[in-house]
Image (cartoon, grey):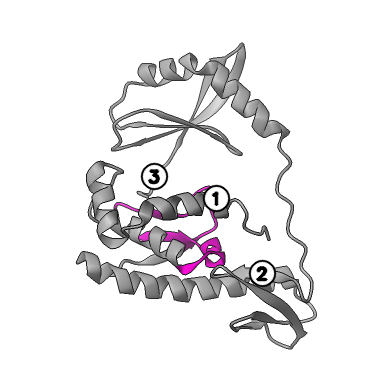
């Protein structure tokens, strides 16, 4: 997905209360409203008048306020417990976690196990996240190097992301960020996200032409996008 321009924080009055929202302008064609844990976010065309943007928000005031109230009632995800012998999904396969005392932090990934070397003074969760990020970095770099030539583009710089609501982004400068938590998912889903972001090097939007570029690289993108939405909600939280 194209990397967003910096958001601007604004205020609007809905239902008699002052409500903050974040406005992001880009080369899109319509105004979109999103509610998540961070509140109301508005995506708008670069030249859309502010009065039109806020008029649309007011027209959807009931929806906005109801969604915000629903989010406020949600219980935040709790970190998954970490113990020797539990299973952690890596590349879509459950791997038995083995916690081993060691002087230096490290890990080994086998077909059925994830072995962590954990120094006594370090939290095992921190080691787990660090090692999964390293596995993700190596794998994502390999997949970018595999798929970029298929599109006829140079392998772009890679950055890891920890975003809760985005799997990837592509900046106007051609830099790609991928969420390290993708390492939990099957390789075909990782490849879908990689191909999605690479396609933005050709088309920095989500137009029909963009999706035709994605389809060149990933013919099953529709099924994989749906599977990503479903399985992405079930990933462990650390």
Q: Is residue 148 left or right of residue 162?
A: left
Q: Is 184 situated left or right of 223 in this image? A: right
Q: Which element is circle 3 on?
A: loop
The magenta segment is 160-187
The label nearer to you, 2 versus 1, is 1
Determine which quarter of the picture holds residue 216: bottom left
**First along the sequence among labels 2 and 3:** 3
- Residue 163 colored magenta? yes
Q: Is residue 132 left or right of residue 24?
A: right
Asked whether disc 1 touches disc 3, contact meaning CB atoms under 8 Å apart, the reply is: no
Q: Is residue 104 visible?
A: yes
Instruction: Identify which residue, 28 or 26, lies in the foreground.
Output: 28
Residue 157 vs residue 88, the one in the foreground: 88
Extreme residue in the bottom direction: 103
The residue at 29%/44% (across/down) is 205
Instruction: Farthest residue to the left: give it.
Output: 152
Residue at left 44%, top 38%? 7
Q: Position of residue 147 (x, y in %)?
A: 30, 69
Q: Which residue is mark 3?
A: 4
Q: Mark 1 Cα within 10 Å, few/some/many (few <14, many 20+)?
A: few
Residue pictured at 56% horizontal, 67% vertical: 92
Residue matched to label 2 = 88
Q: CA distance from mark 2 to mark 1?
A: 18 Å
Cα distance between the residues tagged 1 and 3: 24 Å
């Amino acid at each position: 997905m194209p990397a967003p321009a910096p958001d601007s924080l604004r205020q609007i009055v809905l239902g008699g209360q002052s409500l903050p929202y974040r406005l992001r302008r880009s080369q899109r064609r319509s105004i979109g409203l999103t509610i998540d844990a961070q509140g109301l976010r508005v995506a708008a065309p670069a030249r859309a008048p502010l009065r039109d943007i806020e008029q649309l928000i007011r027209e959807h005031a009931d929806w906005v306020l109801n969604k915000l109230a629903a989010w406020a009632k949600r219980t935040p995800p709790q970190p998954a417990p970490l113990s020797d012998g539990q299973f952690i999904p890596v590349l879509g396969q459950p791997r038995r976690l083995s916690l081993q005392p060691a002087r230096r932090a490290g890990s080994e990934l086998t077909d059925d196990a994830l072995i962590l070397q954990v120094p006594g003074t370090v939290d095992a969760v921190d080691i787990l996240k660090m090692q999964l990020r390293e596995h993700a970095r190596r794998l994502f770099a390999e997949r970018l190097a595999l798929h970029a030539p298929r599109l006829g583009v140079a392998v772009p710089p890679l950055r890891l992301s920890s975003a809760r609501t985005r799997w990837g982004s592509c900046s106007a400068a051609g830099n790609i960020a991928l969420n390290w938590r993708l390492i939990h998912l099957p390789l075909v889903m990782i490849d879908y996200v990689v191909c999605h972001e690479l396609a933005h090097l050709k088309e920095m939007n989500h137009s029909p032409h963009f999706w035709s570029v994605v389809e060149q690289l990933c013919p099953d993108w529709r099924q994989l996008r749906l599977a990503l939405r479903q399985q992405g909600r079930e990933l462990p939280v650390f």
